[in-house]
């Protein structure tokens, strides 16, 4: 249920923020609540993945992609995610999620998510996502055109080759 309120908070906050650029970084601050924890009293590994979805939501909302995509019947889907845990984030600790678009190819958009606690990296996640409609995947060039972005993708990070 807490995740639902986080989603609503991000959407409402972005109604009043200025539009950001495609390559701008998203910065979200959170605290580990009991619904985020597992029996070890730290942020559950599955919750990390859920929280990366909030970072992508923030990026899509701030670029106005989400609003424009929904009007066309498009919806975002994650095709794969990779995560590396480095430090635990314990109960009630504050942490920051930094999200950015790392690049794209003809089909996929690649996201980088960095979890930070007290300035240290706690985890790094990568996800690849696609916009879909009834006919299947929407080409990335159409997605970028929807938000008036016509520049080429930045160089893709090496981690992209690890996706199945």
Image: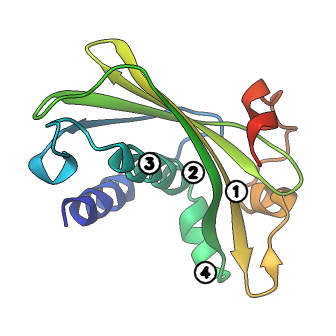
Please report whichever mark, 1 or 2, sits nearer to the chain's N-terminal start: 2
Question: Where is residue 40 drawn, in percent x and y?
Answer: 17, 37
> What residue is shown at x 61% (from left), y 66% (from top)?
76
Give whichever of 88, 40 is nearer the camera. 40
Question: Where is residue 159 drawn, in percent x and y?
Answer: 73, 30
In the rendered view, tell whether residue 136 sits above or below residue 67: below
Secondary structure of the residue carrying tag 2 is loop
Please report whichever mark, 4 or 1, sits nearer to the chain's N-terminal start: 4
- Is mark 4 in CB contact (under 8 Å) with mark 3? no
Question: Where is residue 42 drawn, in percent x and y?
Answer: 20, 35
Secondary structure of the residue carrying tag 1 is loop
In the picture, measured across the screen, residue 108 lies left or right of residue 87, that is: right
In the picture, measured across the screen, residue 2 lies left or right of residue 141, that is: left
Give the spatial CA distance, label 4 vs label 1: 13 Å
Give the spatial CA distance, label 2 vs label 4: 15 Å
Which numbered marker is on residue 147?
1
> What residue is shown at x 28% (from left), y 25% (from top)?
88
> What residue is shown at x 75% (from left), y 54% (from top)?
148
Question: Where is residue 69 drawn, in percent x and y?
Answer: 63, 71
Give whichever of 117, 138 is nearer the camera. 117
State which quadrant residue 78 falls in.
Answer: bottom right
Q: Give the residue number, with chain letter if any, for mark 3.
A: 49
Give the spatial CA distance, label 1 vs label 2: 7 Å
Q: Give the residue number, with chain letter if any, for mark 4.
A: 71
Q: Give the residue number, with chain letter if any, for mark 2.
A: 63
Give whichever of 8, 82 is nearer the camera. 82
- Is mark 1 in CB contact (under 8 Å) with mark 2? yes
Classify mark 4: residues with Cα within 10 Å, few (<14), some (14-19) or many (20+).
few
State which quadrant residue 110 falls in.
Answer: top right
């Amino acid at each position: 249920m807490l995740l639902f309120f986080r989603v609503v908070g991000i959407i409402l906050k972005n109604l009043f923020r200025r539009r950001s650029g495609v390559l701008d970084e998203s910065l979200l601050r959170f605290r580990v609540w009991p619904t985020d924890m597992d029996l070890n009293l730290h942020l559950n590994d599955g919750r990390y993945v859920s929280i990366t979805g909030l970072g992508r939501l923030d990026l899509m909302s701030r670029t106005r992609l989400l609003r424009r995509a929904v009007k066309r019947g498009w919806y975002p889907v994650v095709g794969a995610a990779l995560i590396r845990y480095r430090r635990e984030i314990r109960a009630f600790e504050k942490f920051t999620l930094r999200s950015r678009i790392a690049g794209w190819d003809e089909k996929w958009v690649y996201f980088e998510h960095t979890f930070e606690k007290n300035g240290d990296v706690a985890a790094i996640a990568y996800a690849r996502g696609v916009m879909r409609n009834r006919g299947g995947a929407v080409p990335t060039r159409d997605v970028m055109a929807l938000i008036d972005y016509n520049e080429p993708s930045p160089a893709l990070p090496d981690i992209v080759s690890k996706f199945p």
